[in-house]
Image (cartoon, rainbow, N blue to C red):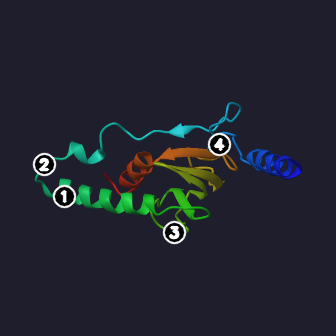
Amino acid sequence: MSRLLVLSSLVLSTSCLTDTRASRDRGTGLFDNVPLYKAPEVSRCEKFKKGGGARAACEEARYLAEAYVRGLSSPDDVCLEGGFGERPGRGCLARASVSDAGPGKVLIEVRTAQPSSRWFGKEANQFWFEEGALVDLYLAEHGY
């Protein structure tokens, strides 16, 4: 009888060790206020004629952008303005770092921004970007 009691208590105690809490995605909780930059509904490359050289160049740039964005992970440094897709250099107006990545999105924290940057005053803030939004940023920064 005592063996049965000990065995029962062991089974019950191990069942209490499981974590049943819902997993949390950073920046998406009830009290978190992290903006999300959504991907545009239409790619920038769609504005070019099919079969044209400009369209082919844009599609190639989009391919490179997608590969770059999908390769981002914490704690990669990125340039949010003035060179997105390259290591932050002297021309970078807003330096940032990847804080987290989730399915189809990246959490980026602005580190420093020049006064002429649209990110000025947003230092130490985090922003979720859908992958498509970062691809669009890459294309915009490369003249498409």
Task: Locate residue 114, reporting x and y percent.
Answer: 62, 54
> What residue is disc 1 on?
56
Q: Reading the chain from its start, which is encountered first: label 2 or label 3? A: 2
Q: Reading the chain from its start, which is encountered first: label 1 or label 2? A: 2
Task: Locate residue 121, reporting x and y percent.
Answer: 67, 44
> What residue is disc 3 on?
87
> What residue is disc 2 on?
50
Horizontal side of 108 relative to 2 (left or right) equals left
Q: Is 105 situated above or below 112?
A: above
Looking at the rendered structure, the secondary structure element under dot 3 is loop
Horizontal side of 33 relative to 53 (left or right) equals right
Q: Reading the chain from its start, which is encountered first: label 4 or label 3? A: 4
Mark 4 to mark 3 CA distance (whole Å): 30 Å
Single out the residue that lies furthest toward the top. Answer: 30
Mark 4 to mark 1 CA distance (whole Å): 40 Å
Mark 1 to mark 2 CA distance (whole Å): 8 Å
